[in-house]
Image: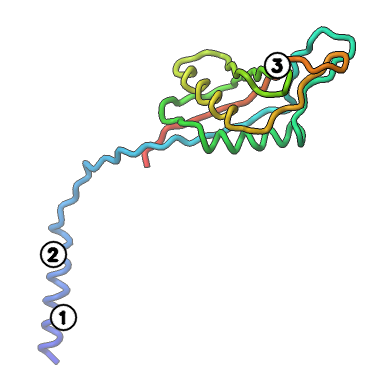
Amino acid sequence: MRTIFLFLALCAMNFSLAQDQEERDDSFIRESNKNLLKIDIKEPFMQVAVKCNDFKPAAFEGGVAAYKDILNRYMYAYLNSDFYALTGDFTFTLVLDEKGKVTDVKGMPKVANSEVFFDDMQYVVRRIKRNWIPASCNGKPVASQIKVKMNFSSMAVDI
């Protein structure tokens, strides 16, 4: 019995001394960064009206809420926010042709690193394959513009 007790005491002391002598390397730096995104797309979207007697604004199949949902999901999926950390209110103008296809996306305001963000947004909007129902003037489809306002916030963190 003494032998077992002595053996257990030596093992316990050995383990406790081994933990005290362990050196820690606190200089380890991870090189993988990730940005946290917060996106708040405002409703309603604003339609830039065309001078016309019988103007009907452009519409999205399923409504503005459906487009907002798709845009939000695609932004989280396709934005490459490793190259910028932006916070603030941004307005994007979607330029639609007579067929309802988005032909251009323009972002405002221009701030530091916003051009990369605006290029990413062009890519995101073009990934959405569904077209808009074009605006019409006197029953004929016309080109139009839609303004989408959003509050965008990206924060860089180390993982």
The image shows residue 158 at horizontal and vertical percentages of 37, 38
The quarter of the rendered structure image containing the C terminus is: top left
Q: Residue furthest bottom?
A: 1
The residue at 14%/92% (across/down) is: 1
Is 125 rendered above or below residue 141? below
Residue 20: x %, y % from top left? 16, 59
Q: Within 10 angstroms of label 2, few (less than 14), some, or many (20 or more) residues?
A: few
Q: Which mark is residue 145?
A: 3
Residue type pointed to by label 2:
Leu
In percent of width and height, residue 107 lies at 58, 17
Mark 2 to mark 3 CA distance (whole Å): 73 Å
Q: Quadrant of residue 2?
A: bottom left
Q: Amino acid at mark 1?
A: Leu
Q: Is residue 2 above or below residue 102?
A: below
Which residue is denoted by mark 1 in the rendering? Answer: 8
Q: Between marks 1 and 3, how big is the CA–CA gap?
A: 80 Å
First in sequence, mark 1 or 3: give its number: 1
x, y percent for residue 85? 45, 26
First of labels 2, 3 by sequence position: 2
Give me the disc on residue 140: none
Q: Amino acid at mark 3?
A: Gln
Q: CA distance from mark 1 to mark 2?
A: 14 Å
- The residue lying toward the viewer, choosing from 108 and 158, is 108
